[in-house]
Every structure is written in C-alpha cells, then in structure tokens.
Image: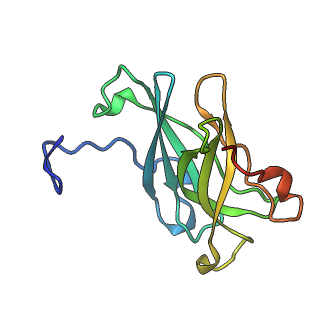
Amino acid sequence: MRMSDPWTLEGEHRLLTAPTLSWEKQGGMAINEGPVILQRNRLICLVYSASTTWSEDYALGMLTMSEAADPMEPLSWEKSMSPVFCKSVENGIYATGHNSFTRSPDDREDWIVYHALPAAGADVSLRATRIQKFGWNPDGTPDCGIPCSDTLQRYSCYSRPFG
C-alpha cells in the first residue's frame, strides 16, 4: 500500500489484527481501534485500543515485530494475549484507552497519554485525559504499569516531565 497523493491510498489493504480475544470484545462489540506506533531498539510496537469506550474494560493491546520484518505482512506481527494497559479497580480508574506516547521536553522520560473513566459504570462523557510516565520491559516492549489513582497521592505518580 502506498499514497498516490496526500489523501489517496493505493494498493492492497491488509488486516493486521482483529478482535479475537475475549478482553477485546467487552461492552457488546468487538473492536480494535486507534492504533499508534512506538519504535525503540529495532522493535516496532503497534498499540491499539480494544473493546468499547463505554465498557469499564476498554484497554490497550499490542502487536510487536522486528524492525527488519515486513509491516504489511500480518504474520510479521505477534499479538499480546492480554491487555498491556487496563483498568485498576484498586485505584478506581476504568476504561483506559485511546492512547498516545510522548517524550519529556529534555528527551529523558517516556509518557503515555490516555483517557479513562473515574468509576465503574460511569457515563462515557466523564472520560478524562490522563498522562503518566512509563518504563520498558527487558524484551523492549513498553511497561505502562497501572493507571495512577486520582487521590492526593497522585503527585508522586504524576511528577512533572523533565526539561
């Protein structure tokens, strides 16, 4: 697939992932949406949102592949069998999804930006944008941890980005 101009794609479409796992089918619909690419150390991660935004189980999944592989070949990608970032009942944060990644101004820290609901069963209009630091697993994939609480303890979780 290639772009013939800034608004037209040409070539064969390829389906890289579909909602096949139970955690991708919560809220009455099977959904994979909002993909974002994160690349580091010759590993490409395609992070996507799964399930519905109105489900407390809206979560992030991930496909990974080597930088040397063909990204248009579905067999190049390995799919995570469980969410890589999801609700935290303990911290009262639900429906974590539709994310992006960014770096601190001095390029020393990695941050995930996402939206979430403040309670189980909360109306989708109460979604709030959230940001927190994340780290890296030994295999090179992002370790987003768990969603930080909205309590006053958040200041240790939400320190300002460097730079």
Q: Quadrant of residue 120?
A: bottom right
Question: Does 97 sit left or right of 34 as displayed?
Answer: right
Where residue 143 sits: x, y (%)?
66, 37
Question: Does 80 sit left or right of 108 as displayed?
Answer: left
Viewer-closest of 83 and 135: 135
Count of numbered marks: 0
The residue located at (25%, 42%) in the rendering is: 14
Q: Quadrant of residue 96?
A: bottom right
Decide: is 103 above or below 28. above
Q: Is residue 87 visible?
A: yes
The residue located at (46%, 47%) in the rendering is: 20
Question: Does 160 sit left or right of 25 as displayed?
Answer: right
Viewer-closest of 163 and 146: 163
Decide: is 45 above or below 6. above
Where residue 42 sits: x, y (%)?
46, 22
Q: Residue furthest right?
A: 153
Where residue 84 sits: x, y (%)?
62, 43
Quarter the N terminus occupies: top left
The residue located at (35%, 41%) in the rendering is: 16
Viewer-closest of 35 and 32: 35
Q: How is the image coloured?
A: rainbow
The residue located at (29%, 31%) in the rendering is: 73
Q: Is residue 90 visible?
A: no
Where residue 33 sits: x, y (%)?
43, 56
Q: Residue furthest top?
A: 68
Quarter the C terminus occupies: top right
Decide: is 93 above or below 76. below
